[in-house]
Amino acid sequence: MNWAMNWPMNGIVGIFLVLFAAKWLVENGLLWLNLAHVRRAGASVPPALAGRIEPEAAAKSARYTLARGRFGFLRGLFGAALALVLLFSGVMPWLDRVLSGGGGPLPPLDGIPLSAVFLIVLGAASSLAGLPFALYGTFVIEERFGFNRQTARGWIADRLKGLAVAAVLGLPLLWGVLAFMAHAGRWWWLWVFAFVTAYQLALVWIVPTWIAPLFNKFSPLADLELKERLETLAKRAGFRTRGLYTMDASRRTGHSNAYFTGLGRTKRIVLFDTMLDRLTHDQTLSVLAHEIGHYRLRHIARRLALGVGTTLVMLYVLSLLERWPALYAAFGFAGPSHHALLALVALGGGAFTFYLSPLAAWYSRRHEYEADAYAVELARMPGALKSALVEFSDQNLSNLNPHPWYSAYYYSHPALPQRLAAIDGAAVHLPPVQGAGES
């Protein structure tokens, strides 16, 4: 064939490579800009944190940020190279031929079994290729900075349990999606949307009760005084929960956090034991008020709705791409297939959507500001909330001096100095309360 006959395929490849390169350059340019910014800042403490963070802690935070950043660059470089190899080496069309009976010792597959096995093999190969990075991140970097508390045996056990959970939960989902794509006609994307949405909502109920306990132990909060204060606060906010739980995060890491999970009867608030070891009662109360704020301000429902809407748009786009022969030919496939479509989108779709990342980060940061303001109004302890956030930052070695462009693109939470300033702004409108836990 001459160039004129091949131009649709060449155009697809050309556009993809341009966008793929743009994504890589933007993301890694921001990464190195941030690392240079952190390196220049060194042990300096932002004015808003003066007296709260020691220079030695700031220096360790900078070293941790630099180590994670350089590691992230190498991991991202490997991921980009792997994606390009899978897309352009011909290995995926070869696997398609082997599984469909075009060669090799395997019995020929067709239809949904072919698509399912193809995607499982591809996913397993990608996961195996990333294992060295997961090991290095846990047992070298996290170990070096005192965060890792997991043994090799425990790490392997977690991976095996994760694999079993993925098989039990993921295989029915994959089979159901492929079945609707194969048998639901031109409107398959609507059927898949309904199926996936129902499946995700079911997981919101299942995960807190059945899945999470496979990996961690969840115990009712043992500190009765703290529990009473937390329950009183939740009741005052009109927040009904099935319980306050402590999670044994210290089995694996020194990082600290708290989170809200579940819906309806499975709704619960989980506090890391590493957090309770470091925070005062007032600080813990302010953190809970923040988490309640996410619920009362409908952030969780909004994010769920946004995710559902994004899924619908993505599936509609897939339905348009499904019958575009040039797309498959551009990457070496003999013809259209559901597994080829899903694999191409999974490997290359990020090149077309990466510009949405800063919008998602901005939306998340806005919710964090709103939840902080709610916590100030509910708990009336702005000082305790600020000191809790400083404690989190210190314990987790968060970057104290992020480049503003990098944080705008990536950060789901505001940088700490800006967050503390916003809390001060929210506290201005509060009447003074005796014993408010100011620090």
Image (tube, rainbow, N blue to C red):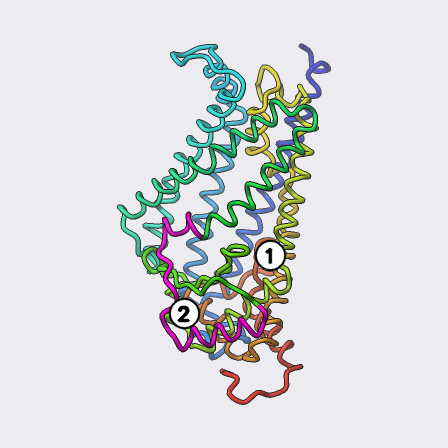
Residue 413 appears anywhere in the view: yes
Q: Position of residue 34 (x, y in %)?
A: 54, 56
151 vs 251, nearest the viewer:
251
Q: Position of residue 75 (x, y in %)?
A: 45, 43
Helix, strand or loop at mark 1: helix
Could you tell me how many numbered marks the image carries? Answer: 2
Q: Are marks 2 and 1 in contact (CB under 8 Å)?
A: no
Work out whether 429 lies above or below 159.
below
Q: Residues in magenta? A: 209-238
Give the residue at mark 2.
57
Q: Position of residue 174 (x, y in %)?
A: 52, 31
What label does residue 117 carry, if any? none
What residue lies at 59% left-to-right and 21% top-to-bottom? 337
Q: Tell whether position 220 is magenta.
A: yes
In the picture, the quarter occupied by the N terminus is top right
Work out whether 91 lies above or below 281.
above
Gap between marks 2 and 1 measured at Cα? 34 Å
Q: Main secondary structure of the magenta part?
A: helix
Work out whether 17 lies above or below 233.
above
Give the residue at mark 1.
300
Q: Tell whether position 183 is magenta.
A: no
Q: Amino acid at mark 1?
A: Ile
Between disc 2 and disc 1, whose residue precedes? 2
**Residue found at the very far right of the displayed protein:** 4
